[in-house]
Image (tube, helix red, strand yellow):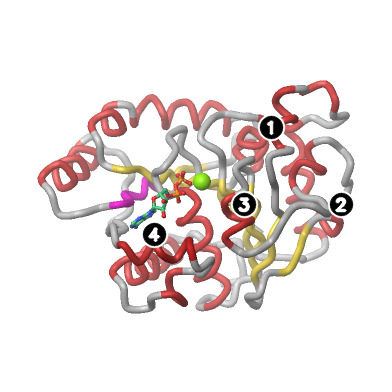
């Protein structure tokens, strides 16, 4: 069983679309039993799969109100794909860190142990918020590997080493996580995108070969609450997400998973 955190401190870089589409492809194509954890109080991943966290989600785990994963895991309409949702109540965890009786650095580690012991799933993906909140720290502390979606602008390219150092520092809480790779998202064929990606590689940063092209279909898919491979199977974004997941699997991303 593996836990993969999808993290960047910037918003709008495709973390949520990557998490939701990767979860769907791993479940649908690779027949992995996937649990997607929404760790962003904006609750985008929860809404994407037409679910709510009203009856419990990550907030309850991080505040000790739920003590076992089966109290908060819910099915989605897709086979093999389950969700631990969240909503704005997750803000409270950071606003009033004293109201929980649990240490966020341990919550998802404990959850992972329980899932492994029960053989309850193969892959956990965590859609992180755009900052090092308690939920992000919880995810990174439990992560086996981290995927960093990034949009090619100068700030992101310049700040990449610093961001990767920050992520590595949090991952050191358990010391096991590696960088699966930086994933260039919202790519389109402009000199800035081409040169930005080349610059990351030139600096020796581990960048996935596949980049995710920008397409209106991706944006539209959020309105229809539908994974891109269902909403627009032949779009460039759907193809790129399939290729990206294939690359992730080929690189050993599921080594301790089912295949
Ligand atoms: N490949 C893409 N092509 C076009 N729009 C995209 C693509 N990926 C993401 N988007 C859009 O960009 C915005 C940010 O994506 P999102 O996944 O919510 O990022 P984050 O979770 O990092 O904030 C959303 O409006 C989303 O629909
Ligand atoms: Mg998001």
The residue located at (58%, 47%) in the rendering is 144
Question: Residues at badges 3 and 4 in contact (C-beta under 8 Å)?
Answer: no
Where residue 30 appears, x then y in whole percent? 53, 75
Q: CA distance from mark 4 to mark 2?
A: 35 Å
In the foreground, 78 or 104: 78
Q: How many marks?
A: 4
The residue located at (76%, 65%) in the rendering is 120
Where residue 133 appears, x then y in whole percent? 62, 29
Where residue 252 appears, x then y in whole percent? 47, 61
Q: Mark 1 or mark 2, which has the lower sequence index?
A: 2
The residue located at (51%, 69%) in the rendering is 226
* Above or below 48: residue 173: above
Q: Which residue is mark 2?
A: 68
Circle 2 Cα neighbour tier, 10 Å, few/some/many (<14 / 14–19 / ≥20): some
Q: Mark 2 or mark 3, which has the lower sequence index?
A: 3
Magenta stretch, main secondary structure, is strand
- Quick one: SS at disc 1? helix
Indicate which disc residue 109 carries: none
Indicate which disc residue 3 carries: 3
* Above or below 192: residue 209: below
Indicate which disc residue 219 carries: 4
Q: Bounds of the magenta span?
A: 181-186
Q: Which residue is mark 1?
A: 91
- Quick one: SS at disc 4? helix
In the foreground, 147 or 150: 150
Please identify the residue farthest to the front as the structure is shown. 223
* Above or below 9: residue 222: below
């Amino acid at each position: 069983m593996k836990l993969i955190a999808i993290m960047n401190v910037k918003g709008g870089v495709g973390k949520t679309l990557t998490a939701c589409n990767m979860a769907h492809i791993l479940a649908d194509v690779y027949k992995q039993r996937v649990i997607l954890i929404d760790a962003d109080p904006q609750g985008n991943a929860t809404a994407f799969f037409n679910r709510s966290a009203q009856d419990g989600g990550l907030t309850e785990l991080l505040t000790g109100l739920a003590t076992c994963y089966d109290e908060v895991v819910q099915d989605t309409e897709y086979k093999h794909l389950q969700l631990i949702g969240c909503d704005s109540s997750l803000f409270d965890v950071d606003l009033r860190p004293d109201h929980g009786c649990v240490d966020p650095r341990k919550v998802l580690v404990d959850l992972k142990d329980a899932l492994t012991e029960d053989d309850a799933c193969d892959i956990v993906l965590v859609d992180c918020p755009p900052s090092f909140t308690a939920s992000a720290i919880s995810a990174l502390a439990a992560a086996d590997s981290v995927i960093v979606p990034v949009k090619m602008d100068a700030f992101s390219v310049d700040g990449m080493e610093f961001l990767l150092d920050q992520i590595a520092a949090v991952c050191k809480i358990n010391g096991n996580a590696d960088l699966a790779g930086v994933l260039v998202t919202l790519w389109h064929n402009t000199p800035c995108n081409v040169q930005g990606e080349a610059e990351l590689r030139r600096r020796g940063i581990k960048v996935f070969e596949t980049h995710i092209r920008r397409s209106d279909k991706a944006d539209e898919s959020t309105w229809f609450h539908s994974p891109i491979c269902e909403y627009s199977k032949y779009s460039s974004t759907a193809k790129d997400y399939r290729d990206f997941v294939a690359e992730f699997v080929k690189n050993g991303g599921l080594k301790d998973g089912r295949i």
